[in-house]
Image (tube, helix red, strand yellow):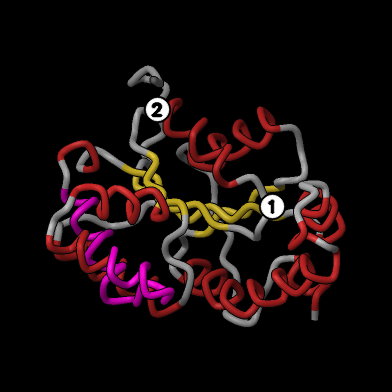
Amino acid sequence: MADAAERPPATRLLLFGPPGAGKGTQAALLAQRLGIPAISTGEELRQAVAGGTELGRRVGSIIAGGALVDDATMAEVVRERLAQADARVGFLLDGYPRTLAQAETLEEILRRQGQALDAAIFLEVPEDELVRRLSGRQRADDRKEVVRERLHVYEKKTAPLVGYYGQRGLLRQIDGNQAVPEVAEAILAALRPGRAPNRARSADAPSFLRSLS
């Protein structure tokens, strides 16, 4: 856990980026360094089901039916998690929001809880490196053409988020094409006082997104 004197004041964070950017690894490192919980929405869905609550049973029913969890249900899961005591001092969201509509919902959830997001950290990695990382996992669904299609799908959802958080002065674009410790240090440096945010226009997109166009 980070020493209080060293901890950046920005502790209500979200981490987003393309498949293969290393979000899960960085979320775990940053949560430990900052002393805040890393909240993975995938894990929260699994825990909701395991908990057997009314919400968990609803999530379980959706998943069992082979459907994607809808935005309203996902918002309930996130709302309940952010209301827990450990998240009151800060949190790092990984996997939510994924769309502009979810970003707007998150803003409303935090507003109702008397909180606000401090920063949105975008891990930027070149397309070729993403393809190499994902293809290297040796899974049948990770053939290069499939990987590139996954990145195209992600592009459609991510470009609006980059603009959304850039316009709000919350965006921190980080070079994710570095060693894991260096990426973590770059993120921490971007959260320290005096560091100007990236103010991307709504039409802007990170380099890997432009390369896919």
Q: Residue at x 45, y 39 (%)?
A: 193
Q: CA distance from mark 2 to mark 1?
A: 27 Å
Say which mark, if any, is on residue 161: none
- Seen at 61% across and 58% down, the residue is 17
Q: Is residue 74 magenta?
A: yes
Magenta region: 60-83
**Left or right for 111, reference 18:** left
Vertical placement of 127 versus 180: above or below? below
- Which part of the image, by quadrant, shows the N terminus? top left
- Callout 2 secondary element: loop
Q: Which mark is residue 20?
A: 1
Where does label 2 land, which residue? Answer: 7
Give the residue at x 42% y 22%: 6
The amino acid sitting under disc 1 is: Gly
Q: Is 40 contained in the magenta span? A: no
In the image shown, does 45 or 101 lie closer to the viewer? 45
Q: Position of residue 156 (x, y in %)?
A: 62, 80
* Magenta part, dominant SS: helix
**Spot occupied by residue 148 in the image (x, y as percentages of width and height):** 79, 70
Left or right of 45, for residue 150: right
Image quarter where the C terminus lies is: bottom right
Mark 2, residues whose alpha carbon is within 10 Å: few (<14), some, or many (≥20)? some
Report which quarter residue 208 is drawn in: bottom right
